Image (cartoon, rainbow, N blue to C red):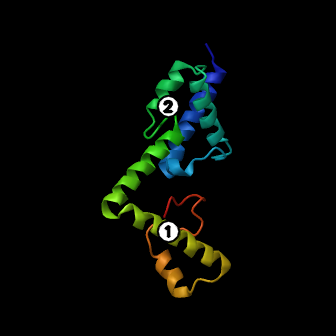
Amino acid sequence: MWQPRREKQEAKLALLYDFLEEHTWDQLTGTTVYRGVRLGLWILNRRQDYRDDTIDPWIVEQLEAVPGWTWNALEEKITHNISLLNMYATVLPPTELLALGRWVRQRRLQYRKGELNQTHIAECEAIPGWTWAPNTKPNAGV
């Protein structure tokens, strides 16, 4: 029996795999459009279907087989960042972590205002993962 809804879901699952071959999960947001398909929205909708208990069991099985899949991306991100913070805290005391965060914010502000000298700009940009705009993709940098 022909099942057009299932075929559409399977096509989007295949598209998700293709996306993840070229990108990371951090690069997939709710507004991500990939090959003309609103893939990010599709992901958000499947997670909502899961929370509402209205998702087809076969889709649950397929999504859970995708490497890195989670039903609660925000919770996973918080857990990941807490792990990172714990790792940094073993190297730096919390007061230095806070001071470092303030220092980074200040350098970014100086950069946006054109007040940061070229030497400091180059030194910051030499830091792996550094970005002047931390809330943008694709870098998940400092």
Picture residue at 66% right of the left edge, 22% below the top: 4
Q: Nearer the viewer, mark 2 or mark 1?
A: 1
Q: Where on the picture, by quarter, is residue 13?
A: top right
Quarter of the picture holding the N terminus: top right
Tally the marks. 2
Locate residue 41, reporting x and y percent: 65, 39
Report the Cα–Cα distance between label 2 and label 1.
Answer: 32 Å
Give the structural element (helix, strand or loop) at label 2: helix
Residue at left offset 40%, top offset 67%: 96
> Which residue position holds label 2?
63
Relative image position of residue 56 (x, y in whole percent): 56, 20
Q: Nearer the viewer, residue 35 or 89?
A: 89
Q: Amino acid at mark 2?
A: Leu
Are there few (<14), some (14-19), or many (20+) residues within 10 Å of tag 2? Answer: some
Residue indicated by mark 1? 130
User: Could you say whether the residue bearing mark 1 is in a helix, strand or loop?
Assistant: loop
Describe residue 131's horizontal placement relative to residue 126 as left or right: right
Of mark 2 and mark 1, the one earlier in the sequence is 2
- The amino acid at mark 1 is Trp
Question: Callout 1 environment at 10 Å: few (<14), some (14 to 19), or many (20+)?
Answer: some
Q: Is residue 11 above or below residue 121?
A: above
Residue 96 versus residue 29 in the image, above or below:
below
- Residue closest to the far left: 90
Point 43% across, 39% down: residue: 67
Please give left or right for residue 98 compared with residue 41 in the image: left
Tell me, for residue 16, which label it has, or none.
Answer: none
The percent position of residue 136, horizontal first and vertical second, equals 60, 59
Q: Are marks 2 and 1 in contact (CB under 8 Å)?
A: no
Q: As rendered, which of 84 and 47 lies closer to the eye? A: 84
- At 47% across and 41% down in the image, what residue appears? 76
